[in-house]
Image (cartoon, grey):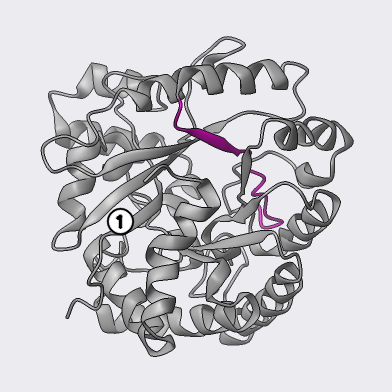
Protein backbone atom coordinates (compact mmCIF):
# COMPACT_ATOMS: atom_id res chain seq x y z
CA UNK A 1 0.00 0.00 0.00
CA UNK A 2 1.34 3.43 -0.98
CA UNK A 3 0.57 5.97 1.75
CA UNK A 4 2.51 8.69 -0.06
CA UNK A 5 0.32 10.45 -2.62
CA UNK A 6 2.99 13.05 -3.39
CA UNK A 7 6.54 12.96 -4.80
CA UNK A 8 9.17 12.66 -2.09
CA UNK A 9 12.62 14.17 -1.55
CA UNK A 10 15.54 11.93 -0.65
CA UNK A 11 18.21 14.12 0.94
CA UNK A 12 20.84 11.47 1.55
CA UNK A 13 22.09 9.28 -1.28
CA UNK A 14 25.60 8.38 -2.38
CA UNK A 15 26.84 8.16 -5.95
CA UNK A 16 30.08 6.59 -7.11
CA UNK A 17 31.73 4.80 -10.00
CA UNK A 18 34.98 2.96 -9.26
CA UNK A 19 35.60 2.72 -13.01
CA UNK A 20 35.78 6.47 -13.57
CA UNK A 21 36.47 8.26 -10.27
CA UNK A 22 38.96 8.02 -7.39
CA UNK A 23 37.59 5.25 -5.16
CA UNK A 24 38.92 2.64 -2.77
CA UNK A 25 38.07 -0.04 -5.31
CA UNK A 26 39.37 1.76 -8.43
CA UNK A 27 42.54 -0.31 -8.85
CA UNK A 28 40.65 -3.55 -8.21
CA UNK A 29 37.91 -2.92 -10.78
CA UNK A 30 40.41 -1.84 -13.41
CA UNK A 31 42.40 -5.04 -12.91
CA UNK A 32 39.55 -7.53 -12.45
CA UNK A 33 36.40 -5.76 -13.64
CA UNK A 34 35.99 -8.25 -16.48
CA UNK A 35 35.92 -11.10 -13.99
CA UNK A 36 33.14 -10.15 -11.51
CA UNK A 37 33.24 -13.32 -9.42
CA UNK A 38 37.01 -13.19 -8.96
CA UNK A 39 36.82 -9.45 -8.25
CA UNK A 40 34.24 -9.96 -5.49
CA UNK A 41 36.30 -12.71 -3.88
CA UNK A 42 39.47 -10.64 -3.95
CA UNK A 43 37.63 -7.62 -2.55
CA UNK A 44 36.10 -9.68 0.24
CA UNK A 45 39.43 -11.26 1.14
CA UNK A 46 41.26 -7.94 1.06
CA UNK A 47 38.80 -5.85 3.03
CA UNK A 48 39.50 -5.55 6.76
CA UNK A 49 36.99 -7.60 8.76
CA UNK A 50 35.68 -4.65 10.74
CA UNK A 51 35.00 -2.71 7.54
CA UNK A 52 33.32 -5.73 5.94
CA UNK A 53 31.15 -6.12 9.04
CA UNK A 54 30.21 -2.44 8.77
CA UNK A 55 29.18 -2.46 5.11
CA UNK A 56 27.78 -6.00 5.09
CA UNK A 57 29.08 -7.18 1.73
CA UNK A 58 31.29 -5.88 -1.04
CA UNK A 59 28.93 -5.96 -4.02
CA UNK A 60 27.39 -2.52 -3.58
CA UNK A 61 30.73 -0.98 -2.62
CA UNK A 62 32.73 -2.09 -5.66
CA UNK A 63 29.89 -1.61 -8.17
CA UNK A 64 28.93 1.73 -9.73
CA UNK A 65 25.93 3.40 -8.10
CA UNK A 66 24.62 6.05 -10.44
CA UNK A 67 21.32 7.89 -11.08
CA UNK A 68 19.74 5.04 -13.06
CA UNK A 69 20.67 2.52 -10.33
CA UNK A 70 19.06 4.71 -7.69
CA UNK A 71 15.92 5.19 -9.78
CA UNK A 72 15.60 1.42 -10.19
CA UNK A 73 15.84 0.97 -6.42
CA UNK A 74 13.00 3.48 -5.90
CA UNK A 75 10.60 1.10 -7.66
CA UNK A 76 7.01 2.29 -7.48
CA UNK A 77 7.79 5.37 -5.41
CA UNK A 78 8.20 8.76 -7.06
CA UNK A 79 11.30 10.59 -5.90
CA UNK A 80 11.32 14.10 -7.31
CA UNK A 81 14.67 15.28 -6.04
CA UNK A 82 17.78 14.05 -4.21
CA UNK A 83 20.73 15.39 -2.26
CA UNK A 84 24.09 13.70 -2.75
CA UNK A 85 26.17 13.35 0.41
CA UNK A 86 29.93 12.96 0.13
CA UNK A 87 31.05 9.40 -0.41
CA UNK A 88 34.65 9.27 0.84
CA UNK A 89 36.23 10.52 -2.42
CA UNK A 90 39.80 9.24 -2.71
CA UNK A 91 41.42 11.83 -4.92
CA UNK A 92 44.79 13.41 -4.15
CA UNK A 93 45.82 17.03 -3.88
CA UNK A 94 44.86 19.96 -1.67
CA UNK A 95 41.48 20.46 -3.30
CA UNK A 96 40.70 16.90 -4.38
CA UNK A 97 37.45 16.77 -2.39
CA UNK A 98 36.06 19.53 -4.61
CA UNK A 99 36.39 17.18 -7.59
CA UNK A 100 33.59 15.05 -6.14
CA UNK A 101 31.24 18.05 -6.19
CA UNK A 102 32.16 18.72 -9.83
CA UNK A 103 31.71 15.06 -10.78
CA UNK A 104 28.32 14.69 -9.09
CA UNK A 105 27.10 18.00 -10.52
CA UNK A 106 27.56 16.59 -14.03
CA UNK A 107 25.77 13.26 -13.50
CA UNK A 108 22.64 12.82 -15.67
CA UNK A 109 20.07 13.57 -12.98
CA UNK A 110 16.80 15.05 -14.19
CA UNK A 111 16.85 13.22 -17.53
CA UNK A 112 14.90 10.19 -18.74
CA UNK A 113 12.55 10.17 -15.73
CA UNK A 114 15.42 10.29 -13.26
CA UNK A 115 15.04 12.46 -10.15
CA UNK A 116 16.61 15.89 -10.12
CA UNK A 117 19.76 16.64 -8.16
CA UNK A 118 19.02 19.73 -6.08
CA UNK A 119 21.68 19.55 -3.39
CA UNK A 120 25.26 18.43 -2.80
CA UNK A 121 26.87 17.97 0.60
CA UNK A 122 30.60 17.89 0.03
CA UNK A 123 33.59 16.86 2.07
CA UNK A 124 35.88 19.34 3.81
CA UNK A 125 37.88 19.43 7.02
CA UNK A 126 37.20 22.50 9.18
CA UNK A 127 40.52 21.92 10.93
CA UNK A 128 42.46 22.42 7.70
CA UNK A 129 44.21 25.77 7.19
CA UNK A 130 42.77 25.72 3.64
CA UNK A 131 39.20 25.13 4.79
CA UNK A 132 37.84 28.48 3.60
CA UNK A 133 39.45 28.03 0.20
CA UNK A 134 37.91 24.56 -0.08
CA UNK A 135 34.46 25.97 0.73
CA UNK A 136 34.90 28.67 -1.90
CA UNK A 137 35.89 26.11 -4.52
CA UNK A 138 32.94 23.85 -3.65
CA UNK A 139 30.61 26.83 -4.08
CA UNK A 140 32.20 27.70 -7.42
CA UNK A 141 31.98 24.08 -8.59
CA UNK A 142 28.20 23.82 -8.30
CA UNK A 143 25.21 26.05 -7.54
CA UNK A 144 23.77 22.96 -5.84
CA UNK A 145 26.41 22.95 -3.10
CA UNK A 146 24.64 23.28 0.26
CA UNK A 147 27.17 22.36 2.91
CA UNK A 148 29.63 19.79 4.17
CA UNK A 149 29.87 16.56 6.08
CA UNK A 150 32.90 15.87 8.24
CA UNK A 151 32.56 12.35 9.61
CA UNK A 152 33.50 11.81 13.25
CA UNK A 153 32.32 8.23 13.83
CA UNK A 154 34.72 6.52 16.21
CA UNK A 155 33.87 3.59 18.48
CA UNK A 156 35.58 2.23 21.63
CA UNK A 157 35.13 -1.33 20.33
CA UNK A 158 38.26 -2.07 18.24
CA UNK A 159 36.19 -4.43 16.09
CA UNK A 160 33.97 -1.61 14.82
CA UNK A 161 35.16 0.34 11.81
CA UNK A 162 36.03 3.98 12.51
CA UNK A 163 35.20 6.54 9.84
CA UNK A 164 37.48 8.97 11.68
CA UNK A 165 40.67 7.77 13.43
CA UNK A 166 40.17 9.36 16.85
CA UNK A 167 37.36 10.53 19.09
CA UNK A 168 36.52 14.14 19.89
CA UNK A 169 36.65 15.63 16.40
CA UNK A 170 33.66 17.94 16.98
CA UNK A 171 35.18 19.43 20.14
CA UNK A 172 38.68 19.98 18.77
CA UNK A 173 39.66 23.70 18.86
CA UNK A 174 41.07 23.64 15.32
CA UNK A 175 37.85 22.08 14.04
CA UNK A 176 35.74 24.69 15.82
CA UNK A 177 37.73 27.58 14.39
CA UNK A 178 37.01 26.46 10.84
CA UNK A 179 33.46 25.33 11.59
CA UNK A 180 32.47 28.92 12.39
CA UNK A 181 33.00 29.78 8.70
CA UNK A 182 29.88 27.81 7.75
CA UNK A 183 27.80 30.68 9.13
CA UNK A 184 29.69 33.19 6.97
CA UNK A 185 28.88 31.22 3.81
CA UNK A 186 25.33 30.28 4.91
CA UNK A 187 26.13 26.57 4.68
CA UNK A 188 24.73 23.54 6.51
CA UNK A 189 26.46 20.73 8.35
CA UNK A 190 25.78 16.98 8.28
CA UNK A 191 27.02 15.33 11.49
CA UNK A 192 27.87 11.63 11.38
CA UNK A 193 28.73 9.98 14.70
CA UNK A 194 28.08 6.75 16.53
CA UNK A 195 25.48 7.06 19.28
CA UNK A 196 28.02 7.16 22.09
CA UNK A 197 29.25 10.44 20.60
CA UNK A 198 25.88 12.19 20.55
CA UNK A 199 26.92 14.50 23.42
CA UNK A 200 29.63 15.88 21.13
CA UNK A 201 26.98 16.87 18.55
CA UNK A 202 24.89 18.49 21.27
CA UNK A 203 27.91 20.44 22.51
CA UNK A 204 28.81 21.54 18.96
CA UNK A 205 25.24 22.67 18.28
CA UNK A 206 25.12 24.64 21.52
CA UNK A 207 28.24 26.53 20.48
CA UNK A 208 26.92 27.44 17.03
CA UNK A 209 23.17 28.13 17.21
CA UNK A 210 23.23 29.98 13.85
CA UNK A 211 24.60 27.05 11.84
CA UNK A 212 21.94 24.55 10.65
CA UNK A 213 22.98 21.03 11.69
CA UNK A 214 21.41 17.73 10.74
CA UNK A 215 22.31 14.49 12.51
CA UNK A 216 22.73 11.66 10.03
CA UNK A 217 21.22 8.23 10.59
CA UNK A 218 19.51 8.90 13.92
CA UNK A 219 22.89 8.79 15.61
CA UNK A 220 23.84 5.26 14.46
CA UNK A 221 23.43 3.14 17.62
CA UNK A 222 26.00 0.46 16.86
CA UNK A 223 24.99 -3.03 18.00
CA UNK A 224 21.45 -2.13 19.00
CA UNK A 225 20.00 -4.94 16.87
CA UNK A 226 22.66 -7.59 17.38
CA UNK A 227 26.33 -8.34 18.07
CA UNK A 228 29.04 -6.44 16.21
CA UNK A 229 32.74 -5.91 16.76
CA UNK A 230 34.57 -7.54 19.66
CA UNK A 231 32.08 -6.90 22.46
CA UNK A 232 29.20 -4.65 21.35
CA UNK A 233 25.55 -5.73 21.46
CA UNK A 234 26.33 -9.27 22.61
CA UNK A 235 23.36 -9.68 24.96
CA UNK A 236 19.77 -8.48 25.09
CA UNK A 237 20.63 -6.49 28.22
CA UNK A 238 23.51 -4.76 26.45
CA UNK A 239 21.31 -3.93 23.47
CA UNK A 240 18.70 -2.45 25.79
CA UNK A 241 21.40 -0.34 27.40
CA UNK A 242 22.49 0.96 23.99
CA UNK A 243 18.89 1.86 23.15
CA UNK A 244 18.24 3.55 26.51
CA UNK A 245 21.38 5.67 26.29
CA UNK A 246 20.45 6.60 22.72
CA UNK A 247 16.98 7.69 23.92
CA UNK A 248 18.48 9.90 26.61
CA UNK A 249 21.17 11.50 24.45
CA UNK A 250 18.90 12.10 21.44
CA UNK A 251 16.40 13.84 23.74
CA UNK A 252 19.14 16.18 24.96
CA UNK A 253 20.14 16.92 21.36
CA UNK A 254 16.51 17.75 20.57
CA UNK A 255 16.75 20.71 22.97
CA UNK A 256 18.95 22.40 20.34
CA UNK A 257 16.15 23.85 18.23
CA UNK A 258 18.25 24.42 15.10
CA UNK A 259 19.15 20.73 14.85
CA UNK A 260 17.31 18.34 12.52
CA UNK A 261 17.65 14.55 12.34
CA UNK A 262 17.68 12.24 9.34
CA UNK A 263 15.66 9.06 9.88
CA UNK A 264 18.04 6.98 7.82
CA UNK A 265 20.78 4.41 8.14
CA UNK A 266 18.99 2.13 10.61
CA UNK A 267 19.61 -0.82 8.30
CA UNK A 268 23.35 -0.46 7.98
CA UNK A 269 24.85 -3.80 9.06
CA UNK A 270 26.94 -2.04 11.76
CA UNK A 271 23.78 -1.75 13.86
CA UNK A 272 23.86 -5.51 14.28
CA UNK A 273 21.67 -6.78 11.44
CA UNK A 274 22.23 -10.30 10.14
CA UNK A 275 20.14 -10.13 6.96
CA UNK A 276 23.19 -10.03 4.67
CA UNK A 277 24.62 -13.13 6.31
CA UNK A 278 21.29 -14.91 5.79
CA UNK A 279 21.34 -13.74 2.15
CA UNK A 280 17.97 -12.04 2.48
CA UNK A 281 16.57 -8.58 3.08
CA UNK A 282 14.06 -7.35 5.63
CA UNK A 283 10.35 -7.47 4.91
CA UNK A 284 8.17 -4.42 5.47
CA UNK A 285 6.77 -5.95 8.65
CA UNK A 286 10.26 -6.66 9.99
CA UNK A 287 11.36 -3.11 9.24
CA UNK A 288 8.28 -1.65 10.94
CA UNK A 289 8.91 -3.71 14.07
CA UNK A 290 12.56 -2.72 14.26
CA UNK A 291 12.28 1.01 13.53
CA UNK A 292 9.07 1.85 15.41
CA UNK A 293 10.70 2.50 18.82
CA UNK A 294 13.25 4.82 17.20
CA UNK A 295 10.78 6.72 15.04
CA UNK A 296 8.24 7.10 17.85
CA UNK A 297 10.86 8.43 20.26
CA UNK A 298 12.30 10.79 17.64
CA UNK A 299 8.85 12.23 16.97
CA UNK A 300 8.24 12.57 20.71
CA UNK A 301 11.38 14.65 21.30
CA UNK A 302 11.87 16.48 17.98
CA UNK A 303 8.33 16.71 16.70
CA UNK A 304 7.78 15.89 13.06
CA UNK A 305 8.88 19.40 12.06
CA UNK A 306 12.60 18.56 12.46
CA UNK A 307 12.70 14.98 11.18
CA UNK A 308 13.71 14.06 7.65
CA UNK A 309 13.35 10.72 5.90
CA UNK A 310 16.44 9.76 3.90
CA UNK A 311 17.46 6.50 2.28
CA UNK A 312 21.26 6.40 2.74
CA UNK A 313 21.33 4.24 -0.38
CA UNK A 314 23.14 2.16 -1.31
CA UNK A 315 24.67 1.74 2.17
CA UNK A 316 21.53 0.13 3.66
CA UNK A 317 21.04 -2.11 0.62
CA UNK A 318 22.57 -5.30 2.12
CA UNK A 319 19.78 -5.36 4.74
CA UNK A 320 16.69 -3.86 3.08
CA UNK A 321 15.30 -2.74 -0.26
CA UNK A 322 14.58 0.94 -0.74
CA UNK A 323 10.94 0.22 -1.60
CA UNK A 324 10.43 -1.67 1.65
CA UNK A 325 12.16 1.04 3.67
CA UNK A 326 9.97 3.80 2.24
CA UNK A 327 6.79 1.78 2.77
CA UNK A 328 7.76 0.85 6.33
CA UNK A 329 8.65 4.40 7.38
CA UNK A 330 5.43 5.69 5.84
CA UNK A 331 3.46 3.07 7.77
CA UNK A 332 5.05 4.04 11.08
CA UNK A 333 4.59 7.79 10.48
CA UNK A 334 1.07 7.56 9.01
CA UNK A 335 -0.76 7.51 12.38
CA UNK A 336 0.68 10.99 13.02
CA UNK A 337 -1.28 12.33 10.06
CA UNK A 338 -0.88 13.50 6.48
CA UNK A 339 0.90 16.67 7.57
CA UNK A 340 3.59 14.64 9.32
CA UNK A 341 4.10 12.48 6.22
CA UNK A 342 4.52 15.51 3.95
CA UNK A 343 6.85 17.20 6.39
CA UNK A 344 9.12 14.20 6.95
CA UNK A 345 9.18 12.90 3.37
CA UNK A 346 9.34 16.25 1.59
CA UNK A 347 8.98 19.67 3.19
CA UNK A 348 11.59 19.44 5.94
CA UNK A 349 14.32 18.46 3.49
CA UNK A 350 13.38 21.33 1.17
CA UNK A 351 13.47 23.82 4.03
CA UNK A 352 16.62 22.55 5.73
CA UNK A 353 18.73 22.40 2.56
CA UNK A 354 17.04 25.40 0.91
CA UNK A 355 16.36 23.36 -2.21
CA UNK A 356 15.27 25.24 -5.31
CA UNK A 357 12.12 23.30 -6.14
Query: In this picture, is 254 found above or below 122?
Result: below
Our reading of the magenta stretch's main secondary structure is loop
Q: Which residue in the protein does label 1 denote?
A: 317
177 or 244, which lies in front? 177
Task: Look at the image and tell me in which quarter the N terminus lies.
Answer: bottom left
Q: Which residue is at a point 73% across and 37% down the rendered structure image?
A: 183
139 or 300, which lies in front? 139
Furthest-front residue in view?
357
Where is residue 231, by image quadrant?
Answer: bottom right
Q: Which residue is at a point 71% across and 76% down the rendered structure image?
A: 251
Task: Tell me if 181 is positioned left or right of 341 in this view.
Answer: right
> Residue 200 in the image: x percent, y percent?
78, 55
Query: In this picture, is 131 found above or below 285?
Result: above
Q: Which residue is at a point 20% across and 54% down the rendered structure image?
A: 73
Furthest-right residue in view?
173
> Residue 276 in the image: x percent, y percent?
30, 62
Indicate yes or no whether the magenta region holds residue 326: no
Q: Is residue 20 visible?
A: yes
Task: Tell me if 177 is positioned left or right of 103 in this view.
Answer: right
Query: In this picture, is 157 found above or below 45?
Result: below
Furthest-top residue in view?
93
> Residue 175 in the image: x percent, y percent?
80, 34
Magenta span: 143-158
178 or 220, which lies in front? 178
> Residue 108 in the image: x percent, y percent?
22, 29
Where is residue 267, by image quadrant?
Answer: bottom left
Where is residue 21, by image quadrant?
Answer: top left
Query: In this picture, is 66 found above or below 239?
Result: above
Please state the total of marks drawn on the protein image: 1
Secondary element type, mark 1: loop
Q: Is residue 235 visible?
A: no
- Residue density around tag 1, few if under 14, some if 14–19, many if 20 or more, within 10 Å: many
Amino acid sequence: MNLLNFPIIDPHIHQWDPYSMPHKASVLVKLLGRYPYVMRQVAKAGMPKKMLDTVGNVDHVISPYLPADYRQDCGRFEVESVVHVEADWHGHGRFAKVDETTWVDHLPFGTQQLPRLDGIIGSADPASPRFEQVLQRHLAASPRFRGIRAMASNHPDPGVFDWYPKCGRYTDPAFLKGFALLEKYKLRFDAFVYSGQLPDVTWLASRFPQIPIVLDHLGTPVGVFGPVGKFTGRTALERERIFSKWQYDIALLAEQKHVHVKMSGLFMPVLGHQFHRQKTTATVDQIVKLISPFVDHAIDVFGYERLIFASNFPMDKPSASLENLIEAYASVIHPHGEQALKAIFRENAINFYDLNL
